């Protein structure tokens, strides 16, 4: 095996495992909330969710400093820090005896997991020769992490009889992975773009394109959060109306199936993206997403399962396309910061806004605020609102496609194979 192939395999292996564990850790508490509360006398559900929200706040806020540090010192040291900090957060949470111990553990988990997205994606974009395909595969592991997190938490709790081992047990492989990564070759301290592009900064139109893309991703974070927050409940409510699906709903398999199909969408989109410039593909995926999001809010039974699976395919397919577009339109030396900006917009502001809106809409508080009956009420209203934000994301993507680059920029047309065009 050549040195380059070995390095690329190392990069893909560690970033995929890190992506999966990011989503496992950040959602780990959700399935074992009653067990955690039982260990702390007098703790109410809202008390625990308030403490756990600390990890989400730090998760979003830490993205930009993590990206800046990776641009300055290289991606590998930051990924090692990701594994160590996440593991330490898990151990602190697992040994917590006071609520403030929990808060500290959740904060460390948020800090550790905030590192992965800006750093891991920058490493893939600069160290792998076919980055779009790699991002699709990497995205699948993230979806699997989201789907497996509640199952891992429940199984570890049931096997050991104590919720604490859900956090402590997962910390052990994280520390081993930190050691393994530290002794592996990922291309040196500062990985260079695999295509060795000659970067020209501030080229005409490029900043405007990136601005519209980031706006689309901000709206994407809002609709993604609206959907993810209420999708298990929507599936449970709608699929339970079909007798042959009720048992699967109770076991939690249907959300796992939907998330898994979403992961397949990421892999497929990664392969599609490798042969295209990407902006038109971004538009097409969003065009497919908008009606499917709305339909998921109103269908029941088997049509709901089919519609939700198709929605997940398109919704998750957006991610490798977005990440590859940012890589193609930004300079390698600022890639980490750009990804950090993306994820503070999507995970920080976007998901924070979407999570809050989902509760307000389901309870009818949005309709009460406007003092009139509203389409945006109840579970179906959450998905109607999500479809509107997806449409706003689509509008930004269209504007990003309309912007022209300088005539001297080669491969400017969508029809050409521009996946190695010079970024800026």
Image (tube, rainbow, N blue to C red):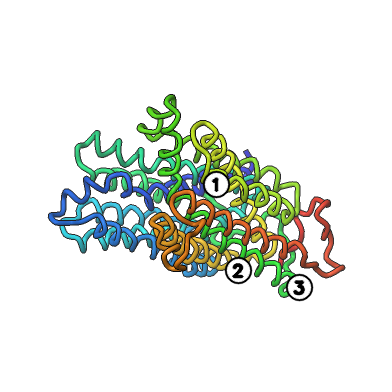
Quarter of the image containing the C terminus?
bottom right
> In front: 127, or 399?
399
Q: In the image, what residue occupies the spot 73% across and 69% down?
A: 206
Q: In the image, what residue occupies the spot 41% across and 38% down?
A: 236
Sequence order check: which comes first, mark 2 or mark 3? 3
Quarter of the image containing the N terminus?
top right
Q: Secondary structure at mark 3?
A: loop
Q: In the image, what residue occupies the spot 44% across and 45% down?
A: 146
Residue 409 image position (x, y, % from top left): 83, 65
Q: In the image, what residue occupies the spot 38% across and 62% down?
A: 111
Q: Is residue 198 above or below residue 202?
A: above
Q: How many neighbours does mark 2 have within 10 angstroms: few (below 14), some (14-19), or many (20 or more)?
A: some
Q: Is residue 184 left or right of residue 108?
A: right
- The residue to which callout 3 is attached is 203
Marks 2 and 3 sit apart, C-alpha to C-alpha, by 15 Å
Marks 1 and 3 sit apart, C-alpha to C-alpha, by 30 Å
Q: Is residue 105 left or right of residue 75?
A: left
Marks 1 and 2 sit apart, C-alpha to C-alpha, by 22 Å
Q: Are marks 1 and 2 in contact (CB under 8 Å)?
A: no
Residue 79 image position (x, y, % from top left): 46, 56
Residue 81 image position (x, y, % from top left): 41, 59
Q: Is residue 75 above or below residue 14?
A: below
Mark number displayed over residue 139: 1
> In front: 5, or 170?
170
Please, which residue is most extreme toward the top here?
244
Residue 391 image position (x, y, % from top left): 63, 58
Q: How many neighbours does mark 1 have within 10 angstroms: few (below 14), some (14-19), or many (20 or more)?
A: many
Q: Secondary structure at mark 2?
A: helix
Mark number displayed over residue 334: 2
């Amino acid at each position: 095996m050549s040195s380059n192939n070995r390095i690329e395999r190392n990069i893909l292996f560690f970033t995929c495992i890190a992506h999966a564990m990011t989503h496992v850790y950040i959602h780990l508490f959700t399935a074992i909330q009653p067990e955690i509360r039982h260990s702390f006398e007098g703790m109410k559900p809202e008390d625990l969710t308030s403490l756990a929200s600390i990890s989400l706040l730090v998760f979003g806020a830490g993205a930009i400093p993590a990206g800046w540090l990776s641009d300055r010192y290289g991606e590998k040291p930051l990924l090692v820090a990701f594994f160590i900090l996440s593991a330490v957060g898990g151990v602190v949470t697992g040994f917590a005896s006071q609520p403030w111990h929990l808060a500290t553990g959740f904060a460390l988990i948020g800090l550790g997991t905030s590192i992965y997205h800006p750093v891991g994606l920058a490493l893939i974009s600069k160290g792998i020769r076919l980055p779009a395909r790699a991002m699709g595969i990497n995205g699948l592991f993230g979806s699997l992490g989201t789907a497996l997190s509640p199952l891992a938490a429940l199984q570890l709790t049931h096997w050991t009889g104590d919720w604490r081992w859900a956090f402590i047990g997962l910390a052990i492989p994280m520390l081993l992975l930190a050691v393994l990564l530290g002794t592996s070759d990922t291309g040196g301290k500062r990985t260079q773009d695999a295509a060795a592009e000659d970067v020209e900064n501030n080229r005409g139109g490029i900043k405007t394109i990136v601005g519209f893309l980031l706006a689309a991703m901000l709206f994407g974070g809002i609709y993604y959060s609206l959907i993810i927050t209420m999708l298990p409940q929507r599936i449970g409510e709608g699929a339970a109306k079909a007798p042959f699906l009720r048992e699967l709903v109770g076991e939690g398999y249907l959300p796992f199936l939907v998330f898994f199909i979403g992961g397949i969408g990421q892999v497929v989109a990664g392969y599609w993206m490798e042969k295209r410039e990407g902006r038109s593909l971004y538009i097409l995926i969003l065009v497919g997403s908008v009606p499917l999001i709305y339909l998921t809010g109103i269908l029941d039974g088997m049509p709901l399962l089919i519609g939700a699976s198709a929605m997940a395919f398109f919704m998750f397919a957006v991610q490798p396309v977005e990440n590859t577009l940012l890589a193609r339109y930004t300079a390698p030396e600022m890639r980490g910061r750009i990804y950090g900006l993306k994820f503070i917009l999507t995970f920080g502001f976007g998901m924070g806004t979407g999570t809050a809106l989902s509760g307000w809409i389901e309870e009818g508080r949005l309709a009460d605020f406007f003092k009139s009956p509203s389409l945006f009420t109840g579970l179906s209203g959450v998905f109607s609102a999500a479809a509107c934000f997806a449409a706003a994301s689509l509008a930004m993507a269209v504007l990003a496609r309309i912007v022209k680059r300088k005539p001297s920029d080669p491969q400017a047309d969508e029809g050409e194979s521009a996946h190695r065009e010079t970024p800026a």
